[in-house]
Amino acid sequence: MIEAHHLTKTFKDKKRGLIRAVEDVSFTCQPGQIYGLLGANGAGKTTTLRMLATLLQPTSGTAKLAGHDVATEADQVRANVGFLAASTALYGRLTAREMIRYFGQLNGLSDEAIRARIKLLADELDMHEFLDRRCEKFSTGMKQKTSIARTLIHDPAVMIFDEPTLGLDVMTARAIVKFVRECRNRGKTVIYSTHIMSEVEKLCDVVGIIHDGRLVAEGTLAGLRARYGEQDLEEVFVKAVGGEAALAAAAKN
Amino acid sequence: MNWKNIVTVYLKELKDSLRDRRTLISIIVIPTFVMPALFFGVGKIAAGVVNKAREEIPSVMVLGGEDSPAVVAELGAAKKFKVVATAPDWKQQISDKKVRAAIQLPPGFEAGLKVGEAGPVILYNYEGELKSGFAVNELERFFRELRDRTVTARLAERSLPATLVRPFEFKRENVAPPEKVGGNLLGGIVPYLIIILCFTGAMYPAMDLTAGEKERGTMETLLCSPVPRVDLVLGKFLMVLTGSLSAMLLSLASMGISAVVAGMVFAGGPGAAKAAGQAQGGAGLIPIIDPMGLLGVVAMVLPVAVLFSAVIFTVALFAKSYKEAQSYVGPMIFIVIMPAVVGMLPGIDLNLRLALVPILNLSLVCKEMLSGVWHWNYIALIFGSSCLYAAVALGLAVKMFNREDVMFRA
């Protein structure tokens, strides 16, 4: 389970002064549910997810993942989280097996458990063919499969996906979407950030629309459509953030 | 802090680094092959240049001397230099290296010699130019001999013995063991090389494991693991230290082997080379170094290698990319070289204040240890202060690794 309460993150910038990247964001995500964080570029999605993954410390507010506080129990939070983002890359000079094993070791698994998990993941993700090849030679699809195996090696209860399909071809993106759905089916708590409306429609049980660092709307897809009187999710999104002018102003900032 | 985590991170970084060509070149290839090749190659070239300069018979000009035909004739007959026709632009010719030196004979020099009132002979040379220096040395020798002959002749005229002006002779003999002489000769250069190698050996792994990882996106992946930050830093830091120490030890071993091989090739075998070294008071082909001194140097270098590794690690951590890290770390080598060079200078001795100056203190104490001087109080002070500096630098590296504005610098 993920519980975020009034999460706020500010950064100091020499030119722009104090920047509020995330302001007063609160939401809850239950096990077996996918929470979609929908927002434009720079809306605050990555910062929110990085706070949940304990990569960044909240300026104020709290969050609990799998019952552990991100501020005071960061190591336990990370032990229960799988974080997959476009920015989390692989060690090019290691093979896929070495990469997955390394993260298994970092998560405190025994050699035997790591071997068993690698076999299971390689079967599920069809990785046997390239398991002992160096990651630097991989295609995008192979890289994503290895990254997924890396996030799942310790079988975490919470999965955080930060725009995982960014820059991927259609087939690889479909495989990721399928994998996220499987995570939900296995009872994991999943948070999924994106700005691609079709992915939200395919995957998310609850959607939070984030704009300019604030969570401006939240609800099920049906609920949001009803509230804004629009069937097209893109129109729902534009209305929720305050219209095209507001989007343009945020993009300028 | 969990040693299992630290070892896991270290072993992964070691494997990763050994597969990186840039790191391999900097910690293995350069210290093992390039440094000895440069060291001996430059030495051989320098010796060749000096020998060639010595073999050249320099051209010199005689200014004046019209009233001293015998001296001019004697100068002309000398085999060590060649007198060429005097030209009005003699100064320019010396500057242009067409002529190496010029002799200004004072008016009435020969006549003055006979009555003991000869004016001074002036020798013109181009200061700092090797061949001009050799030429003027030969001219000095010529006039010294002329002066000695004149004195001897005058004493003989007066039936006085030569011992009147030279009542006794003296000569010097070396009592220092060859390894102490070798230590004195190499005392400056060995610590200098060790310091530079320790630094360069740490550079590439440090940049690759920090800025390189940020650039490749693997740092964020690593930070997602539940391993405490301090364990990640220490695992990575140990790899940087491995790079630093392996560069230094491989270079020392390689240079030692090269010296023995060079001895066998040029002096007809290791025994002959050693004998040649001893015959010249340790200044032969292989200057002999006290092994205890060398061990002492390696021990003293350890905390400094830790200091270098931690400082470079911290500085490189600030950078967003490998290229940016290079621009920060590259100039740091000058900060390291300066105290190392100062330590090589003759006349700078270890004292309480200098014993606390990092790098310089190492350079000075190593020089002493290699020449067989063991100031235990200074050694303890330098080792202790170096450990303290290293600990502070390592603490700073951990602190920086925990700062999100450093790790996620936009």
Image: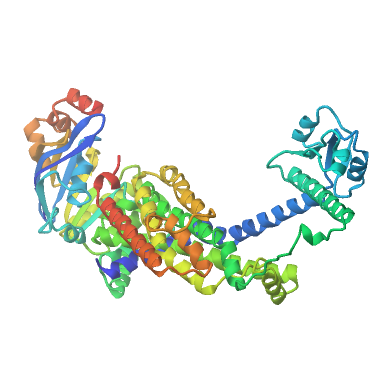
Question: In the displayed image of the protein, which residue is found farthest to the top?
Answer: A245
Q: Position of residue B275 (x, y in %)?
A: 70, 74
Residue B96 appears at what percent x and percent y? Answer: 76, 33
Nearer-the-camera pick, A161 or B159: B159
On the rendered structure, is A57 left or right of A129?
left
Residue B334 as seen in the image, left or right of residue A16: right
Q: Nearer the viewer, residue A226 or B372?
A: B372
**A232 versus B398 height, above or below:** above
Residue name at image x 52 percent, y 55 percent: B347
Examine the rendering and report whether any part of residue A133 can be seen.
no
Which residue appears farthest toward the bottom when viewing the image? B271
Quadrant in the picture for residue B381: bottom left
Task: Give the left or right position of residue A162, taking residue B377 as reference.
Answer: left
Residue B135, relative to residue B227: is it above or below? above
The residue lying at 87 percent from left, 54 percent from top is: B158
- Quarter of the figure with the C terminus of chain B: top left
